[in-house]
Amino acid sequence: VGAGPGLEVDRLGKRYGELRALDGMSFLVRPGELFGFVGGNGAGKTTTMRIVLGVLAADSGQVRWDGAPLDFAGRRRIGYMPEERGLYPKMKVGEQLTYLARLHGFGPKAARREVEQWLERLGVAERRDDEVQKLSLGNQQRVQLAAALVYRPMLLVLDEPFSGLDPVAVDVLSEVLREQCARGVPVLFSSHQLDLVERLCDRVGIVRQGRMVACGTVSELQRAGSARLVVDAPS
Ligand code: ATP
């Protein structure tokens, strides 16, 4: 983790045909900060995250990491949990995670150690030899989270990571995110669960029509009268 400013999203613009999905989206997630991204359906959260990841190109604007444009090598070091999820259904849990860690340069032993540690931590160690498709949705989600963490990312970008989780898993995920922040990793996540966002986040960004309409700590937003904006988002 660098000492620089962390993740900078600078005036992103993106159109899908006639539809303007992003219109000057800008914000900062500093090292060690837990940043919650809220806003109604179609506000532009997923599009922003996919551009940060580099799976989608912006029409304009820039994404920077520690002051420099985020390049391919940097993007590979992002832990990403896509909204549509992205595990191989027929691969075994342990194999899949080990494969990911190996892809990111971990040796065989270190990869297995990381995988075991995350499977234990997330409560799915007994599932390591099961095919992903055989798992409950909640457990698939835990494995998806392990997949974002297993190669020690420099930045976490999580699209609706809490959706569909049982209360125990919500607590574990909250704890894991706080720990990652404590290690200096910036975390950007979107959520419709506003109570969670308020409880967890250092700062919250409210997205509407492809731009950030308010950004700050929960108490700053409340003082500025933006509480209603937060409440406007679907829960
Ligand atoms: P949600 O909470 O529903 O995921 P979101 O804030 O993540 O919403 P986006 O998924 O970024 O919003 O969508 C922003 C806008 O772009 C929406 O109007 C959406 O319909 C549109 N959009 C997203 N992806 C595409 C695409 N591939 N082609 C056309 N339009 C798209």
Image (cartoon, grey):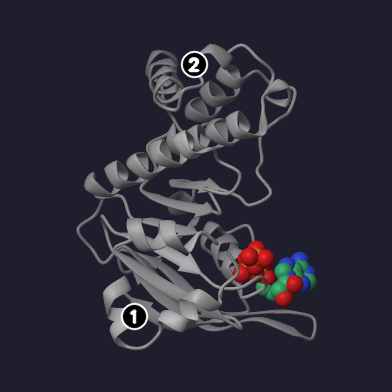
Amino acid type indicated by mark 2? Ala
Tell me which residue sits at (45%, 22%) in the image.
Answer: 115
Q: Quadrant of residue 208?
A: bottom right
Ligand 1 within 8 Å of disc 1? The answer is: no
User: Among all residues in the image, which is located at the extreme left?
Assistant: 3
The image shows residue 96 at horizontal and vertical percentages of 60, 24
The image shows residue 29 at horizontal and vertical percentages of 34, 65
Drawn side of residue 32 relative to residue 191, left or right: left
According to the picture, the residue beneath numbered tag 1 turns out to be 221
Front-lying residue, 162 or 186: 162
Q: Secondary structure at mark 2?
A: helix
For label 1, count other residues whose C-alpha is less than 10 Å away and answer few (under 14), some (14-19) or many (20+): many
Distance between mark 2 and mark 1 Cα atoms: 40 Å
Q: How many marks?
A: 2
Tell me which residue sits at (32%, 68%) in the image.
Answer: 203
Q: Secondary structure at mark 1?
A: helix
Name above or below for residue 143 compared with residue 125: below
Drawn side of residue 116 relative to residue 193, left or right: left
According to the picture, the residue beneath numbered tag 2 turns out to be 125
